[in-house]
Amino acid sequence: MDRTRTHGWADPVELATAAQNTDGLVFSRQLASGEQGPTPIFATLGYALTEVDHGHAVYVGVPAEHLYNPIGFVHGGFAATMLESAAGSAVHSTVPAGTGYTTLDLSVHYLRPITADTGPIRAIGTLINRGRRTALAQAELRDPADRLLAHATSSCMIFPPDA
Ligand SMILES: CC(C)(COP(=O)(O)OP(=O)(O)OC[C@H]1O[C@@H](n2cnc3c(N)ncnc32)[C@H](O)[C@@H]1OP(=O)(O)O)[C@@H](O)C(=O)NCCC(=O)NCCSC(=O)Cc1ccccc1
């Protein structure tokens, strides 16, 4: 083996405790500023939350060799993971402190291959509908030329404090 990569991350239990006790938009902004994290999955794959507002979130990732599948390009799981994060954060930004949420489904369309030459990619998540118990969001994955690489829709379950 001649290729290696090292990375670090924050204690996931401390992160989850902070997430549960903090307003979703405030916590997401803390992740984006670096006040919280790095989140283990973000650090492991190499992407980060860069921008968040109510119902809107942007992640930036750098496709690289460590993300390749055995057939010569970036594994579809990387795109799906970034899209799930973006859609999930769009929902998370709308939940008050003490309210949990989790992804119920993720439907991904892969439109263009991603390689180490693609450059930094952005996953832009947008809230479509927010009910009391479920929320629907979408996310677009775009390359530096703003071409659509992949698209996802995702629904989330919301857990109010008394649920
Ligand atoms: C090819 C197609 C599926 C269909 O295309 P269509 O809808 O008919 O549209 P069109 O043909 O117009 O192409 C659109 C644009 O794409 C470009 N392009 C196409 N092919 C190539 C190429 N070979 N190389 C470079 N570029 C290529 C093409 O030039 C065009 O760009 P342009 O407008 O000229 O600038 C396309 O949607 C696609 O590649 N999606 C991404 C699929 C994907 O990444 N899946 C996830 C990873 S799989 C995985 O990990 C699973 C696994 C796990 C473990 C182990 C093993 C496996």
Image (cartoon, rainbow, N blue to C red):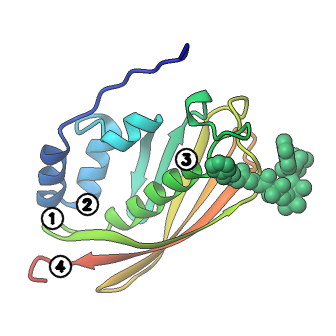
Dividing the picture into quadrants, the one containing residue 20 is: bottom left
Q: Kindly give the residue lying farthest to the bottom in the view shown.
A: 132
**Kind of residue at badge 1:** Ala
What residue would you read off at disc 1? 97
Q: Position of residue 76 (x, y in %)?
A: 62, 51
Q: Are marks 1 and 2 in contact (CB under 8 Å)?
A: yes
What residue would you read off at disc 4? 160
Ligand 1 contact, mark 4 (Cβ < 8 Å): no
Closer to the eye: label 3 or 2:
3
Left or right: 96, with 25 as reference point: left
Closer to the eye: label 3 or 1:
3
Q: Quadrant of the C terminus?
A: bottom left
Q: Which residue does the image show at 24% across and 53% down from the upper left?
A: 26
Under tag 1, what secondary structure?
Answer: loop
| First-in-chain label (3 vs 2) | 2
> Distance of mark 3 from mark 1, alpha carbons?
29 Å
Q: Depth check: 23 or 59 in front?
A: 59
Q: Kindly give the residue lying farthest to the front in the view shown.
A: 1
Q: Residues within 10 Å of mark 4 (few under 14, many from 20)?
A: some
Under tag 4, what secondary structure?
Answer: loop
**Kind of residue at badge 2:** Gly
Mark carried by residue 24: 2
Q: Is residue 50 visible?
A: yes
Left or right: 50, with 141 as reference point: left
